[in-house]
Image (spheres, rainbow, N blue to C red):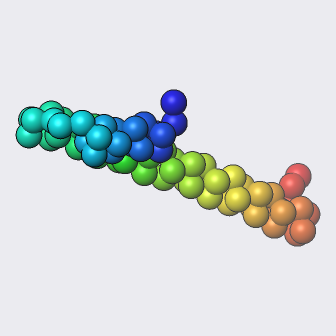
Amino acid sequence: MEDKEAIEILTQLIEKYPLSEKEKEAVSSAIGALGWMKLGNQRIKNIIRAKKAEKKKEKNWKQEFNLDR
């Protein structure tokens, strides 16, 4: 299950069913944790993309100046 889908289901749970304060807090904490996980995963993907782009740029630069010996 994707994080986004899980967040939507948990949000609906809070809106749909009468929960005690502790239950609402637990569900809200779970939503928050999923949100942070999603942000962390996106950050990792961005770092990997940036490193790949940097490598490609370096490779192109070396080829352009014939430094790949």
- Is residue 65 something that shows in the picture? yes
How many labels sit on residues?
A: 0
Q: Residue 13, image x and y in percent? A: 30, 37
Side of 37 where 24 appears, left or right? left
Look at 90% across and 68% down and name the residue there.
64
Position of 38 relative to 27 (above/below) = below
Of all residues shown, which one is farthest toward the top? 1
User: From this viewpoint, is residue 34 visible?
Assistant: no
Residue 49 position within the rendered picture, expressed as x and y whole percent measured from the top left: 64, 54
Percent across and percent down for residue 20 are: 10, 35
Closer-to-camera residue (8/53): 8
Q: Is residue 18 left or right of residue 52?
A: left
Q: Position of 52 compared to 2: left or right? A: right
Task: Determine the residue positioned at 70% across, 59% down.
Answer: 53
Q: Residue furthest left?
A: 21
Residue placed most toward the observer, 66 or 35: 35
Residue 28 lies in quadrant: top left
* Residue name at image x 89 percent, y 62 percent: 63
Position of 69 relative to 8 (above/below): below
In the image, 58 versus 30, the foreground residue is 30
